[in-house]
Image (cartoon, rainbow, N blue to C red):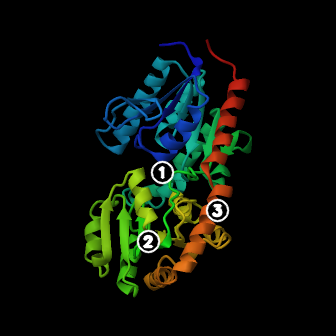
Amino acid sequence: MASISRKRWLILSTVHARNDTRIVLKEARSLSKIADALALAFADGLGNSRTDFGVPIYDLDVRRGSRIVRAIVGNVRAYRFARAGGYGVVHFQDPELLVAGLLLRWRGHLVIYDVHEDVPGDILTKDWIPGMLRRPISFLLDSIEAFSDRQLSAIVAATPTIARRFSPSKTIVVQNFPIEEELGSESSCSDKRAEISYIGGMSAQRGLRELVQAMALTKSGVRLNLGGSFQPKGFEQDLRRLDGWDRVCRLGFLSRIEIKAVLAQSVAGLVTLHPIPTFLTSLPIKMFEYMSAGIPVIASNFPLWRGIIEGNDCGLCVDPLDPQAIADAIDHLVENPDVARRMGENGRRAVVERYNWRMEEKKLIGLYERLLAAADWVR
């Protein structure tokens, strides 16, 4: 094993993809500005490579087996990799890696847990977990996170609501806001087509059934672009049987460049998630990316979201369970381009002024500088 070095930093995930926007394009790119030696480790079986900004990516290759097997193997390989590389700072992204994180902390590494979601809350809604097991598993994970909170060096929370579950003294909020220059476009109203877009994971809880049903109720001749993957895979076949599917353009997985192009020609972006507890207090990146692209947002009428959308006059909030309400909002923006343009400009301005990664980057870098200045290092 190499000696632990405060100059060697590792960002680690066995669940997320190596093109994850928050992990790679935001956090890793930001930290590479101040790091002497930064590395990324994933578990996707795609081999070793480098980012376009020069940070090495290592492959832990733990794809095989059930979720439980992958979690066990992932913890073992992640722990061994971090120890063998002498990475003094380990920034891990998955609750599945809490065991490895704790072991590394007890061996003298600085360990940061990046909490993207309220996982104990999410477990209560997971269809793949038997109903009678959801509450016990949720309670167990909540207890493990509470214990880890006391042991780990720091917690990075993606939203203020998530942060409230952890100790204020060691938790910072680094929100998943857009890189303000990434999706911005110089397109004008004349460049827009009679299209609206949804980009992201597609499931029943994310409102896709109601979106397709809404397309059958629209009167403006608009089409719906869907970019992303269906969860579960068979869900797409269910949607194809609905009235309104003939107005859908299935785009599949999109690169960041392709997302920019699709949004540039769209009248509006959709984020009509169902009112389940974890969504009510979430801040979905797609909402802010639509704003960053300069298009109005049609969003669920959750109080938190309404405060952002209506507070910045950058879109419309609707009942996500009501296809007719969604259709009416779509038609209103398609048929009133001046309104859509004003809302899009307002959303873009709000991103430039408040909801951007530039501000969140400062908080993340500040955390690293404080931890490094205060740490006692094992040699």
Q: Nearer the viewer, residue 90 or 348?
A: 348
Amino acid on which the number 2 mark rests in the picture: Lys
* Residue occupying image coordinates x 46% and y 29%: 54
- Percent position of residue 123, x then y: 47, 55
The disc, 1 or 3, on the residue closer to the chain's N-terminal end is 1
Tag 2, which secondary structure?
loop
**What residue is rendered at 55% in x and 31% in y?**
32
Q: x, y (%) of residue 294?
A: 54, 64
Is the residue under label 2 in contact with that under label 3 (CB below 8 Å)?
no
At label 2, counting other C-alpha atoms closer than 10 Å, the crowd grade (few under 14, some 14-19, many 20 or more) is: some
Residue 13 in the image: above or below residue 80:
below
**How far separated are the C-alphas under marks 3 and 2?**
20 Å
Q: Secondary structure at mark 1?
A: helix
Picture coordinates of residue 340, whole percent (x, y) = 54, 76
Q: Nearer the viewer, mark 1 or mark 3?
A: 3
Q: Nearer the viewer, mark 3 or mark 2?
A: 2
